[in-house]
Amino acid sequence: MNAIAAAHPLLVVSLIKIVVLLFLLMTMLAYLTWFERKVIAHIQSRWGPYRVGPHGLLQPLADGLKFLFKEDIAPAGADKLVFFMAPLLTLSLAITSIALIPFGPSDITIFGQHTPLQVANISLGLLFLFAITSVGVYGVTLAGWSSNSKYPLLGGLRSSAQMISYELALTLSVVGVLLLSGSLNLREIITSQQGTAWGFLPRWNLIAGPMPQVLGFLCFFTASIAETNRAPFDLAEAEGELGAGFHTEYSSFKFAMFFIGEYASMVTVSCLATILFFGGWLSPFPATAAWGWTFYIPAVGFAVLGIYLVADGIRYQTMFGRIVLPVVGLALLGLGVLLSRPGVLVFAQGPFWFLLKMLAFLFIYVWARGTLPRYRYDQLMGIGWKLLFPLALANVVLTSLAVAMRP
Amino acid sequence: MNAAFIMFMALAVLAVAGAINLIAQRHPIHSALSLIVVMVALAGEYLLLGAEFIAAVQIIVYAGAIMVLFVFVIMLLNAGVEERTNLSHIARFLGLPVAAVLLAELAWAVRRGSEAAGVVPAGAVSTRDLSTLLFHEYAFPFELTSVLILVAIMGAIALAKREP
């Protein structure tokens, strides 16, 4: 195996990384649906999924199986080829963009080849991410059109107009970050945010530099919610007006592909917000000896979570839960112990902080869906063109001034 | 036959096939989709030549913005299937000979070009170099182009706002 890897290093190593990442991502996306339903349920004072497995933990599996076994229906007048292509396009583009995300600073070794914790490290990473996002509109548009049905068509038209409008604000809001870091490479953007201000404040783009990117971040995050067609900007699938919007006519696994694609783009955007404004894999604590104890946060965090799960699990109602939950808890505890080993601890710092920040953004996504009512269509367009666009432009001008006047 | 050549040929075939399909298809949306395939294949060719920035911009601007507008307008107007005219008189007696002449000219130019010109200088052009050129040496034409686009936008708004 080492010989093959040495002969075609890029091919073999990339393939392994892609397969591992795809597996982890798919598992995460499946549990993201569980996470969203649970959080929204608790916001609305309900229990959420509860029946399938302890705390509904097997619900994603059941949902996936259900999607696979349902009949795949296409409307009689549908344009078959485009109808089939649209969900494929949505899902593949959403997943492709994750390949550009760097998850940690240190290299890993696969079959004797050193390689970064990232599938594709290209010099124009951010630009290519936006390129993929800009092509992503087609999935929604074509799905709406090819269904040959009036609600999907209206939903598709709405959402393509929405995505075109918000792409402007999304791209412009990032220009400030580019001016500060002077690079389009995602790794360089992260490393440019290293260090602390006044000894304790991290120099993340959000709060530091000659011009804090608070405005840029607010524009970016609002626009990204609209760009991913999520509440409160999910006009494309306003149930009261349009049925389910562009994917009304889709069933079975094609519907699941749209669903997974939406969650994958949520993950991408959360990663991007983390990288651009919140220092990516950088720890929020200074890297001095006095703050050395913060290195143990990942280990202690997992251990505490594991102990809590064991304590909670042995009092669960069903027998199945009383076995499964403590086992999962013990596994997490073991992970915590593993993480406390010196070598692993240093390696785990980057991915841990990265994933923690990303999860925080995903939580905000769900939180927004649980609390904010949907906007009207004219309000949506008003926000995009009359509020976010000028704000992002102002941010570009202010940041350029600050960077130019920097001594 | 190295990997780059195979990639080049594959993308070239894709681009040409997309272009032919663009004319052959009878539904406007299918034609627009073929055009997107052409754009993306061209972006791939730019990438092979080491012009990463141009490749990304090609996708963002052409495939992502202009073609989205095309598809959007086709959907909005609900354009149906086009009818075949089976070559009008003008097309038969004027169009076909002119097309043949143009094709011959193109073939001659390509043949001569491939003998005269060598290999395209390899190596990636950095975004920094590109922007330095754009904003220092060619700043005036660049700004002029943006004014031109602004005029076009204003014209479109003036047309759209005209009293019915």
Image (cartoon, coloured by chain):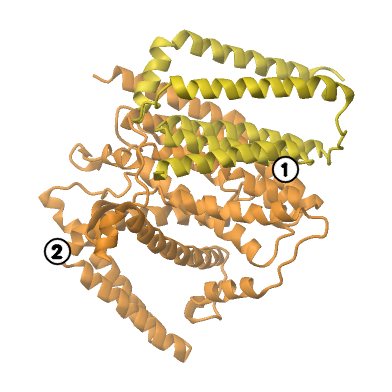
Chain colours: A orange, B yellow
Please name whichever residue, A54 or A121, is drawn nearer the observer in this view of the structure.
A121
Q: Chain of mark 2?
A: A
Q: Are marks 1 and 2 in contact (CB under 8 Å)?
A: no
At 81% from the left edge and 50% from the top edge, which residue is drawn? A150
- 10 Å neighbourhood of mark 2: few (<14), some, or many (≥20)? few
Q: Residue furthest top?
A: B140
How much space separates mark 1 and mark 2, taking CA atoms?
58 Å
Secondary element at tag 1:
helix
Q: Amino acid at mark 2?
A: Pro
Secondary element at tag 2:
helix
Q: Amino acid at mark 1?
A: His
Which quadrant, please, contains the C terminus of chain A?
Answer: top left
Write down the residue under mark 1.
Answer: B30
Q: Position of residue A103 (x, y in %)?
A: 33, 53
Please name whichever residue, A348 or B57, is drawn nearer the observer in this view of the structure.
B57
Q: Chain of mark 1?
A: B
In this rendering, does residue A289 appear at all?
yes
At 41% from the left edge and 15% from the top edge, which residue is drawn? B135
Q: Position of residue A366 (x, y in %)?
A: 52, 57
In the displayed structure image, the side of residue A341 where residue A237 appears, left or right:
right
Q: Nearer the viewer, mark 1 or mark 2?
A: 1
- Which image quadrant for residue B71? top right
At 71% from the left edge and 15% from the top edge, which residue is drawn? B155
- Which image quadrant for residue A390? top right
Write down the residue under mark 2.
Answer: A342
Q: Position of residue B41 (x, y in %)?
A: 55, 39
In this rendering, does residue A371 appear at all?
no
Q: Does A26 appear above or below B137?
A: below
Q: Residue furthest bottom?
A: A319
